[in-house]
Image (spheres, rainbow, N blue to C red):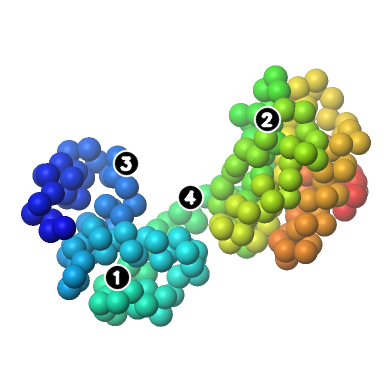
């Protein structure tokens, strides 16, 4: 399909001007950066191919050689893409929260401290302990069937996380870990060791405070 065949509201620049960047898809933003396509692919089709490649190899692992595997994509455009990605990574790194202490976790997860049901959350961190992502894995009473290692570590591998911290709240206000809490922690710790991902801590939160498995030498 040629760009001229698209409705004006579907063209990247026109869509950007009308709706702003927040309303645009990843490939549409990339299309604006690229400016033009290559022989046989318009800029939107090319952008979709590039996004697919980046998702497959991982954002931080995508290299020049990876992008040059896309037939017709030259070094100039490939370099332009990688420069834009690196710029975004550096800017985001400066604005990502840093998690060093259990108190940092208590502040960062203030949204679940007062929940009436247990929320099990995983914080994915980079090598500098900056937050890459925070994801809710399960809601409900914590047990091994609800928190499977696959659900915890699949995002870690996709995000290329160096380490994780798991967090859940106790609506009762008592942060004393249950037998289930300890069993889940042990299971996740063993899985982390197999995968080469640092399991930094399991922290139980309440309105009043927190308990750190690491600080209490529970299982670790």
Mark toward the viewer: 1 or 4: 1
**Residue at mark 3:** 22
Q: Nearer the viewer, residue 104 or 68?
A: 68
**Image location of residue 204, percent across then percent down:** 78, 35
Answer whether labels 3 and 4 touch (C-beta < 8 Å): no
Q: Nearer the viewer, residue 129 or 48?
A: 48
Q: Mark 1 or mark 3: name the one nearer the start of the chain.
A: 3
Q: Mark 3 or mark 2: name the one nearer the start of the chain.
A: 3
**Residue at mark 2:** 139
**Image location of residue 97, percent across then percent down:** 56, 47
**Image location of residue 50, percent across then percent down:** 34, 65
Mark toward the viewer: 3 or 4: 3
Element under label 1?
helix
Mark sitting on residue 183: none
Mark sitting on residue 80: 1
Residue 47, above or below 122: below
Element under label 2?
strand
Mark sitting on residue 95: 4
Residue 55, above or below 114: below
> Residues under labels 3 and 2: Cα distance?
29 Å
Mark toward the viewer: 3 or 2: 2
Q: Mark 3 or mark 4: name the one nearer the start of the chain.
A: 3
Q: Residue at x 12, y 44 (%)?
A: 7
Element under label 3?
helix
Q: Residue at x 78, y 51 (%)?
A: 188
């Amino acid at each position: 399909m040629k760009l001229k065949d698209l409705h004006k509201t579907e063209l990247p620049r026109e869509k950007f001007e009308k709706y702003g960047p927040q309303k645009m898809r990843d490939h549409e933003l990339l299309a604006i950066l690229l400016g033009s396509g290559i022989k046989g692919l318009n800029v939107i089709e090319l952008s979709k191919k590039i996004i697919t490649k980046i998702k497959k190899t991982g954002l931080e692992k995508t290299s020049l050689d990876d992008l040059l595997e896309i037939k017709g994509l030259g070094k100039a455009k490939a370099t332009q893409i990688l420069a834009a990605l690196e710029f975004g990574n550096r800017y985001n790194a400066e604005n990502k929260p840093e998690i060093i202490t259990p108190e940092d976790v208590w502040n960062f997860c203030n949204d679940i401290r007062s929940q009436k049901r247990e929320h099990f959350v995983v914080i994915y961190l980079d090598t500098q302990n900056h937050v890459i992502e925070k994801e809710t894995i399960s809601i409900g009473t914590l047990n091994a069937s609800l928190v499977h290692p696959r659900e915890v570590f699949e995002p870690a591998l996709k995000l290329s996380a160096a380490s994780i911290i798991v967090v859940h709240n106790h609506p009762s206000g008592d942060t004393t870990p249950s037998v289930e809490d300890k069993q889940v922690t042990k299971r996740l710790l063993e899985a982390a060791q197999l995968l080469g991902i640092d399991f930094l801590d399991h922290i139980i939160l309440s309105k009043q405070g927190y308990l750190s498995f690491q600080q209490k030498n529970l299982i670790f």
